[in-house]
Amino acid sequence: MNYKIRAARKEDCKDIARMIMELAVFEKMPDQVNISVEELERDGFCPNPFFECLIAEMSDEHNSKCLTVVGYALYFFTYSTWKGPTVFLEDLYVMPEFRGNGVGKGLMSKVAKVAKEKRCVRLQLAVLDWNSPARDFYAAKGAQDLTDSEGWHFIRFDGLSLDNLVKEAPKD
């Protein structure tokens, strides 16, 4: 199967939004998605973007100029005070009918390449505990499960808990 990986462009946001919803359905959380195409365009394609994204495209076997977006990897940079620059892979998704052809591996490897070019010392991600195929895929590539080995837990503040935390901030 012929596929190409490239940096996402603003006009890809409709496809990215579609695949975000497909991923959310797969993860049994479609009601959690409330990002719009316009927000993706604004947040990813501004002077200081909040995220970067790679797109996987397949060419139609009958028409090489007809490309179909079949996967994406959305990531952003963060910083470890112990280790230094880090890339966080927020989403890695390939449409089901295109899985098993190396597209996911290609996307993840390309994110790793971008990370190394930016001097990142590690690539981090989160995966649902029940998603054994993904966990096995990452383990086969050498990933460590920090929940098991180091006992780290991801913690989140959102909605009311985030608002309440803001209210406790000292006055300027």
Image: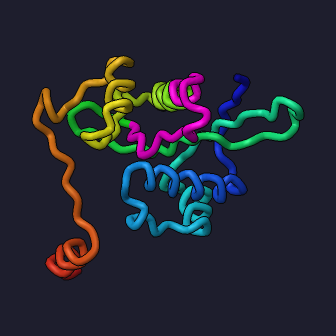
Residue at 35% x, 29% y is 122
Percent x, y for residue 19?
56, 51
Residue 35 in view of the camera: yes
Residue at 55% x, 31% y is 99
Percent x, y for residue 98?
61, 33
**Does the stretch in magenta take in 95?**
yes
Going by the image, does 92 lie left or right of 63?
left
Closer-to-camera residue (111/140)? 140
Residue lying furthest left in this view? 151
Question: Compared to 40, does 73 lie above or below?
Answer: above
Residue at 43% x, 61% y is 30
Percent x, y for residue 8?
65, 45
State the quadrant of the C terminus.
bottom left
Closer-to-camera residue (124/99)? 99
Span colored in magenta = 87-105
Query: Can you tell which quarter of the image residue 4 is in?
Result: top right
**Does the stretch in magenta take in 103?**
yes
